[in-house]
Image (spheres, grey):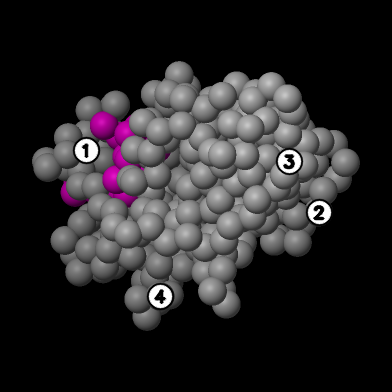
Amino acid sequence: MKKTVIYLILVMIGVTASGGSAYAEEPVVIAINIIPPYVFKKDGGLTGIIPEITQIVAQKAGLPYVVEVYPWARIYKMGLEDKNILLPTIYRTPEREKLFKWVGAVFPLKLWMFKLKKRSDIHIGSIEAAKAYQIGGENEDASTQYLIRLGFIQGKNLTAFTGGKQLVQMLNSGRLDLVVAEELNFQHWAAELGLNASDFEKAYFIEGVQANLNLAFSQRTNDAIVEKYKKALNEIKKDGTFEKVLLKWGM
């Protein structure tokens, strides 16, 4: 998929003698996916709590950066293979701990399995019980990876899709029994499809995923860059900026 560059900001302050020229020549690529209501497009740009916090941190870090929009699976691949890639919407899980360089948590989310309310035949009392149903999740998402780790099998009782709206469509049509999603994401996808969110309900809370959205860099990123971002995030948490942004977006 051709990449969409939403905006480009080159910040030339704060470049130190150690690696300063390298920073200027190779900006940090903030690779972000659209996940309303946390990240969405408006007036030709990006808005939402995640773009706002990420931009504040990036500007405070004082290094050149670009923001590019991709599907999540593409972002995850970039994070595994490329250098200077910042992933601002990644869950921190045991599987991923050594794959990325972690900057810090942004805010917590809760992941659920959703079903059609009229499906009175579906009862989930445990994660093991869910294996009897057809479940859909997003490709390379932390929840999907978690289910695979617990023994769910792609092509048997688990199907991974690239987009959230497709998950809701498949659930609504009866081609899936359950889908894994964050509540506000699910409601937004249903609304975009013209569906009534009240026709669906939560079937099971997924406790096993540490559902904090984090800022994290690809392993090939210079440690000095990572440390600048860590320092910037810690500073905005200490000076009250971080909390103000959370309150602005109702978090």
CA distance separating discs 3 and 1: 48 Å
The answer to which of 75 and 221 lies nearer the viewer is: 221
Extreme residue in the right direction: 239
Q: Nearer the viewer, mark 3 or mark 4?
A: 3
Amino acid residing under circle 3: Gly
Residue 91: image x %, image y %? 49, 37
Residue at the image point whose x is 82% and y is 48% from the top = 241
Residue at the image point whose x is 39% and y is 70% from the top = 190
Among numbered discs 3 and 1, the one appearing first in the sequence: 3
Query: Mark 2 falls on what kind of element?
Result: helix
Amino acid residing under circle 2: Lys
Q: Residues within 10 Å of mark 2 (few under 14, many from 20)?
A: some
Image vertical order of residue 243 relative to residue 125, above or below:
below
- Which residue is identified by label 2? 244
Quarter of the image that includes the N terminus? bottom left
What segment carries the magenta color? 132-148
Q: Quadrant of residue 46?
A: bottom right
For residue 33, the mark is none
